Image (cartoon, coloured by chain):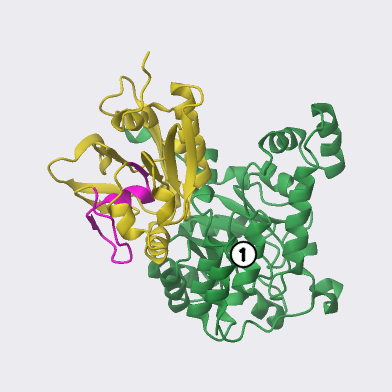
Chain colours: A green, B yellow
């Protein structure tokens, strides 16, 4: 096999990578020790960060890509895939993470946006991207830009699942509402959603998003994770919920099992016993408008 | 009562494998059988074949043990069609102590043999028993570095062995379930006695 016959970073390889994460839990970690705990607990991947979202909220100021030294430390610590976050529209942060060799980039509203008009042109990259979305139009715009995976935005760092639920229901409800529509009606609907019509037609035909759809933003307990799976998520991201709980290793294992047995309340009950304190959490309604992360990027 | 095939549905690209088996079955004959997800030992009953999908081998290995599936899989009487993480799990020896392999194919497997996602690639490879090359998708793929007697090598590239067979089992480092070329699915189904009688 000659090297010039190999093709790297194709659309199928990017979406295929995302498919391999299905049914899994992706955990936020800030150092090698946490990464090892996550891997041991059965995480399918880790998100390498300088701070988890709850601490980003507390710190305030401009939140940027993590120190590459931290990302490399985490990449060296585990054998599962490692993801990293970049600011919305920050092409150079994405180039930096790609050059470090991260397995997937999260263009994330949790960091302070670098561009308020455009997201990164993700099709230009060989590394796959995941992006947040609150509704079907937003999800399809990100896929059109080249995202290989979608996640609900939820409201990161709150430990409150209510926004993730809202966003998942929006996306799933809008897909269900396409059933029975004629192609012409779907094209008209695409204009209302500000989504590319070919992608909406494809979504209607498949009865689901054309890429893997995870849930993120406020998942703090095994029951939260199972709830998102019952609503149709392909898997979950857990940010602050694990390492802001009183027993992170146990919480991590319990969430992995709850995702695996999301339709079996007996198992969820069992893994939830004596888990200790979940993260404290924030009532989303008490946030000032400028503190709400999901409004970033649309 | 038709043919029953299963897909180990603990983690990974389960729906792609269900679709792949369904397409291969309907290719052979209308209404030939069905494909079911397997999460518990009881789900294995009556299955002629089982796919172990791609995903994270450490995660799948952990869930196999948690769900009491380790011994039932080792004792499974049907054929196993294993891809990527599945190939890792089929081996007797794996370079990572976090994976407890099933030991159904006597070979040594190295996880992530090509490196990280940026090293993932697609390429046409020659596969023994197929008359023209197979377009294969390698995603953070493993390779077998050594195979023992009885495990037939179907494909080998510079990095190592990427497809093996020991009837009724087959293990592939790449992902036929992501494409539309069903020749390897057909080869597997022939190995468990399902084929076109025409």
Residue A160: percent from the left, percent from the top?
72, 74
Helix, strand or loop under label 1: helix
Question: Quarter of the image holding residue B99?
Answer: bottom left
Residue A198 % position (x, y): 73, 32
Q: Position of residue A174 (x, y in %)?
A: 79, 46
Q: Residues within 10 Å of mark 1 (few under 14, many from 20)?
A: many
Q: Most extreme residue toward the top, as rendered?
A: B198
A4 or B26: nearer the eye?
B26
Residue for point 82% across, 77% down: A287
Residue B91 part of the magenta segment: yes
A15 left or right, relative to A213? left
Left or right of A144 in this view: A275: left
User: Residue B77 occupies which quadrant of the picture?
Assistant: top left
Question: Residue furthest toward the left?
Answer: B149
Q: Residue A264, can we see it?
A: yes
* Residue at numbered disc 1: A226
Q: Give the letter of the chain under mark 1.
A: A
B191, above or below B71, in the image: above
- From this view, report whether residue A206 is shown above or below residue A53: above
Relative to B112, does residue B158 appear above or below in the rendering?
Answer: above
Magenta segment: B79-104
Q: Residue at x 53, y 53 (%)?
A: A22
Query: Of residues A228 and A94, which is closer to you in this image?
Result: A228
Which image quarter holds the C terminus of chain B?
top left
Residue at 69%, 82% (x, y): give it. Answer: A59
Left or right: A76 in relation to A148: left
């Amino acid at each position: 096999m000659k090297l010039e016959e190999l093709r790297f970073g194709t659309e199928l390889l990017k979406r295929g990578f995302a498919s391999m994460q299905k049914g899994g839990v992706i955990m936020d970690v800030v150092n090698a020790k946490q990464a090892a705990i996550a891997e041991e607990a059965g995480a399918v991947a880790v998100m390498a960060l300088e701070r988890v979202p709850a601490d980003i909220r507390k710190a305030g100021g401009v939140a940027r890509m993590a120190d590459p030294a931290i990302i490399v430390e985490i990449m060296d610590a585990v054998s599962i895939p490692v993801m990293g976050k970049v600011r919305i529209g920050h092409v150079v942060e994405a180039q930096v993470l790609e050059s470090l060799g991260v397995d997937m980039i999260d263009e994330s509203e949790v960091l302070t946006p670098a561009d308020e008009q455009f997201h990164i042109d993700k099709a230009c990259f060989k590394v796959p991207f995941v992006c947040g979305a609150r509704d079907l139009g937003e999800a399809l715009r990100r896929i059109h830009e080249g995202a290989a995976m979608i996640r609900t935005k939820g409201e990161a760092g709150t430990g409150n699942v209510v926004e993730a639920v809202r966003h998942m229901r929006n996306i799933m409800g809008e897909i269900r509402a396409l059933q029975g529509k004629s192609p012409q009606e779907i094209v008209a609907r695409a204009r209302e959603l500000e989504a590319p019509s070919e992608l909406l037609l494809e979504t209607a035909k498949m009865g689901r998003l054309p890429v893997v759809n995870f849930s993120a933003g406020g998942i703090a307990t095994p029951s939260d994770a199972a709830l998102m799976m019952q609503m149709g998520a392909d898997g979950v991201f857990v940010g602050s919920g694990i390492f802001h709980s009183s027993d992170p290793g146990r919480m991590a294992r319990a969430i992995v099992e709850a995702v695996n047995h999301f339709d079996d309340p007996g198992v969820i009950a069992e893994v939830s016993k004596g888990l200790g304190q979940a993260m404290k959490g924030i009532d989303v309604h008490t946030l000032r408008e400028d503190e709400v992360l999901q409004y970033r990027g649309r | 009562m038709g043919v029953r095939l299963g897909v180990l549905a603990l983690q990974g690209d389960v729906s792609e494998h269900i679709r792949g088996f369904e397409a291969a079955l309907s290719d052979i004959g209308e209404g030939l059988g069905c494909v079911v997800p397997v999460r518990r030992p009881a789900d294995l009953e009556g299955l002629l074949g089982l796919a172990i999908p791609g995903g994270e081998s450490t995660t799948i290995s952990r869930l196999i043990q948690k769900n009491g599936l380790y011994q039932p899989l080792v004792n499974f009487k049907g054929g196993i069609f294993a891809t990527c993480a599945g190939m890792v799990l089929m081996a007797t020896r794996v370079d990572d102590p976090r994976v407890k392999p099933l030991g159904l194919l006597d070979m040594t497997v190295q996880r992530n043999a090509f490196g990280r996602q940026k090293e993932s690639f697609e390429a046409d490879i020659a596969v023994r028993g197929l008359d023209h090359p197979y377009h294969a998708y390698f995603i953070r793929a493993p390779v077998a570095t050594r195979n023992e007697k009885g495990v037939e090598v179907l494909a080998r590239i510079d990095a190592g062995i990427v497809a093996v067979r020991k009837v009724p089992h087959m293990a592939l480092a790449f992902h036929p379930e992501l494409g539309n070329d069903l020749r390897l699915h057909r080869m597997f189904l022939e190995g468990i006695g399902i084929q076109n009688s025409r």
